[in-house]
Amino acid sequence: MNRVLAWLEMFGLFALLYVGIPYAGLRIDRILGLSPLPIFVRGLGLILLSVGVAILAWCFALFSRVGRGTPNPAMPPESLVTIGPYQWTRNPIALGHATALIGLSLFLGSVFAAVIVVVLAFPVHLAMLHEERTLEARFGDAYRLYKASVPRWVPRPWKR
C-alpha cells in the first residue's frame, strides 16, 4: 500500500505541474497581450509532449521493475537503475518532464509557460545536486562509477 501511495503522491505533484505551469503561463501571456504561437509551433509542441511522456513512462517502468521503487523520495528505488535512458543521462526524468512541459506549453500556444519551465531548470539542477549526494551515500562506489561514466544533463549519443 505504501508503494501505491508513493506513486499517487508523485502523480498528484505531476498533475499540479502540468496544470499549474500552463495555467500560469497562459494567464501571464494574456496580461502581457502576447499572441498565441503559430500552428506549426503548436504541432512541434505536441511532438515534444509525446516524446517527454514516452521518456517518463520508460523511466517510471524501470524504477518500478528494475529499481523496485518509485520516483518519490519517500520510497526510492532499492537498486540503482543504469539502463535505458539512464545510460545516456543521469536525469532522464527531469529531462522528460522538461521536454513534456515545454511541449505542452508550445501546444497550448503559451510563450510564458515555456519560459517558466526554463526558469525552473535552476532549482531542478540544485535538487539534482542534492539527489546525487543521496545516491552516492546509498549506493557508494556503484554510483560513483556510474556518475563518472554518464553525463548529468546532456545525453550522450547512443553506443553501438
Image (cartoon, rainbow, N blue to C red):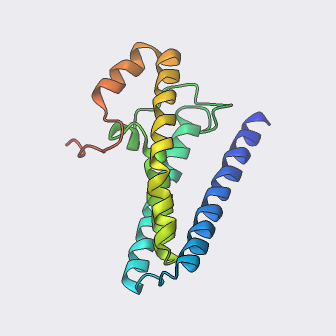
Q: Please tell me which residue lies in front, 59 or 112.
A: 112
Instruction: Answer with the quarter of the image where residue 25 lies.
Output: bottom right
| Residue extending farthest left | 160
Instruction: Answer with the quarter of the image where residue 140 lies.
Output: top left
Quadrant where the C terminus lies? top left
**Residue at horizontal 63 percent and vertical 69 percent from the top:** 23
From this view, report whether residue 5 is shown above or below residue 104: above
Instruction: Answer with the quarter of the image where residue 6 lies.
Output: top right
Q: Position of residue 104 (x, y in %)?
A: 51, 68
Direction from residue 79 to residue 74 in the image, left or right: right
**Residue at horizontal 45 percent and vertical 48 percent from the top:** 121
| Residue extending farthest right | 1
**Residue at horizontal 54 percent and vertical 31 percent from the top:** 67
Q: Position of residue 102 (x, y in %)?
A: 46, 63
Q: Please tell me which residue lies in front, 38 or 138.
A: 38
Direction from residue 34 to residue 1 in the image, left or right: right
Q: Position of residue 137 (x, y in %)?
A: 51, 15
